[in-house]
Structure formats: C-alpha cells, structure tokens
Amino acid sequence: MTTFYEVHVADASGNRLAVFANFTTAGGGQALDYVLSVGKIGVLTMTLPATVDPTLIPLDARLSVWRSINGAPPEMDGDAVFLARMWEYGTDFTRITAFHANELFARRIIAYGTWQTNAMRASDQADDQIKGIVNENMLAGITAFRYGNPLQADVSAYVTEQANLALGVAAPVGAAWRNMMDVILEVAEASTQNGTYIAAEVVAPTEGTLEVRTYAGQRGVDHGSTSSNPVVFSESRGNLKNALLTIDHTNEVTFALAGGAGDGAARLTAAAVDATRIAASPLNRRELFVDVGNLTDTSAIQAAADAAVRQGRPVRLLEAELAETPGCTRGIHFDLGDITVIEHRGFVIDMRLDLVHELLSSDERKSEIKFRSVL
C-alpha cells in the first residue's frame, strides 16, 4: 500500500495559489507533520526547499493536505484547512507552520455582558447554542454596538454556517467576556457529559470554502461493536503498534453537590451520585462541590450536579502507532472521528478516534493515533 501526499495552498479568500509535494527534511525535523484533532486546533508544519517563492504562502493562506491511496484520486484529509501563521527561513529551507481553521474560534471573544438574542436560551440544544455563539461573534449576527470598532468582525463572506440541527443536550454556560473557543468547547463538553456527544469544527467542504459544522454522536462513522460494520484495532490483528491503554481514575467524581443561590440553610442545593461507580470500591465515594451561586432554577442546579458526576468519570485513552493493512486503511475503512473497537490486554472497548498525527520524512511515513472511550 502506498500513500502520496501533496499540500494545496490557497490565499485567505480561498483562491488557489500553488500545490506542493517537494517537501524536504533540510533544517531537521519532519518534511510534513500535521495533526487532526476532533473539535480542537491541530497544527501543520511543512518544510520546503529555499527555492520556493514565499509569496505563494501569504498570511492566513489555506493549506490543505491531499492524500492519494494506492493510486486513487487524492482527497482532502479530514476536510481540514490550516491557516499559515509562521515562516522560518533557513539557508536551504523554508518552514511554514499553520493552525487548523478551528483557530478562527479562538481569535474571537464574547464581547458583551449579556446575550442580545436567543443564542444561549436554556431550551436550545447544544448544536444551536454553538451556532448562535458563532453567528453573533464572527458572522452576520454581529451588531456594531457590541464592538468599539467592528472592522472585519463579520467574516460571513468567507465562512458559512451549517443550519441549526437541534442536536445535543441544552447546555447553557456563562459566556460573557470569554474567549469564544473556550465557550464552544464547554458547551460541547456539557452536552457530551449529559448524554449526547457534540463536536464543532470549521471544515472545508471544498478547497476554497469554509463552513462551521457540528457533529452529534460521533464526527465520523459508527464502526463500534454494536454497529453493522465493526472495525477492530489490536496489536494481534496487526493494525496497531506500541499501544498504550491508560485507565485513569485520578480525578474521578462519584458524588456531587451543587449549591445555587442563597446562604446557609436557605441555600438551594442538588445532589447527584453514580451508584455503580461508587460501589466499585468501598472507599470510592469521591465528592465534589459545584458552586453555581448565580442559579435559582432547581432543575439547572440539578443539571450542574449531574454534569459534575458525568464529567468525573474515569478517563480511558489509547495511544498507538497505526499499522495500516489492506483491510484496515485510514481513508478507506475508517477515518478521523469514527467509533471503533479496541482490543488490548484483555480489554474490549468502543472508542472514538479523536486524533491523527501524520509524520512524513524523507524515507518513511508514520501515523500516530489516539482513541478515547465512548462512555
């Protein structure tokens, strides 16, 4: 099996400028090194010969990696675009570092103290909440009075937004005066911890377009143990190498007490417990107090306690090198964001493929992957 890589470069508006495949390891390090991380900000580093014209890669140039597997037409990896932000000029190389377009979320703040529309109503599902946040702080929903200078605040000419899908669990969070990326991640995590996985990304439907999308259940395809087409990873099957499964109970929470408005005995409180996990050991009552003193709604206080217990579940993470086989090839049989089955040291666990790290040097290609437990 052979995989061929090329990087397509467009300007910040999406107009094609160049295609590169002549990567080099001059200056040390990898020729091409990039990370795809569901809902997070991956990084791409590309090293080219010094003869390459640096004006072909301007500020915020859109870099997308295209992969051809076994001679098939190349496809954009992960629908991902990386925005160029750093250039290093060596004697015989130029190295460019770019950040996944999710970094557009991190460039914005929630620049007002109260919500002006219904973006964060408690009745809205997480999908709609996230899109409302983005619309009000980056796209056409921006109104000038919230910003001292709204110059280029609205980028809806370059970034579109998927329609509201009413996905996920309502997850209102404190958002005013915060970084937008932090708020989006918190809403997505709150929905996930309350029963419905949500992730949000800026993806590239085509090489020249960007779109804000949300995903429910999983980013990709369900190839889990109960699906019609399970995909199983294990060292014995030959598709994993150097696997490390970590099961971490360090920050586990099995009982949470949330405290709302009020003082002393008059304070509103709500408790939550995970009876199964607390019984795993006679000493496994692990308590957490959640201060939500601004809340007077008893259902919201209860939701805060429930979320704390859910968020306090043990972490199950598997890291490994991917060893692709003819029957288990990324981009054909599985891909980023899929739910798959992991078999390791007697454990059989459904896990999401959350991260792909591709490294290309002059003489080899290596893929590192990370899976996180679905539960």
Image (cartoon, rainbow, N blue to C red):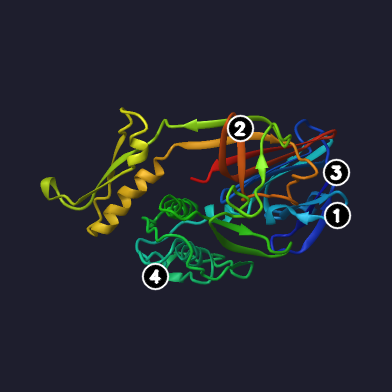
Closer to viewer: mark 2 or mark 1? 2
Cβ–Cβ under 8 Å for marks 2 and 1: no
* Residue drawn 71% across the image and 55% down it: 61
Residue 80 visible, this angle: no
Of mark 4 and mark 3, the one earlier in the sequence is 3
104 left or right of 367 in image: left
Residue 334 visible, this angle: yes
Q: Amino acid at mark 1?
A: Ala
* Label 4, label 3: how far apart the Cα atoms are: 50 Å
Label 4 sits on residue: 118
Q: Amino acid at mark 3?
A: Thr
Of mark 2 and mark 1, the one earlier in the sequence is 1
Closer to viewer: mark 4 or mark 3? 3
Q: Tell me: residue 335, above or below residue 288.
A: below
* Residue drawn 80% across the image and 44% down it: 326
Label 1 sits on residue: 72
* Residue drawn 42% across the image and 49% down it: 193
Q: Nearer the viewer, residue 30 or 242?
A: 242
* Label 2, label 1: how far apart the Cα atoms are: 32 Å
* Label 2, label 4: how far apart the Cα atoms are: 46 Å
Q: Tell me: residue 371, above or below residue 203.
A: above
Choose top left, top right, bottom left or bottom right for residue 297.
bottom left
Of mark 2 and mark 3, the one earlier in the sequence is 3
Label 3 sits on residue: 2
Relative image position of residue 257 (x, y in whole percent): 26, 44
Of mark 2 and mark 4, the one earlier in the sequence is 4
Label 2 sits on residue: 344
* Label 3, label 1: how far apart the Cα atoms are: 10 Å
Secondary structure of the residue carrying numbered label 2: strand
Cβ–Cβ under 8 Å for marks 2 and 3: no
* Residue drawn 43% across the image and 64% down it: 125
Closer to viewer: mark 2 or mark 4? 2
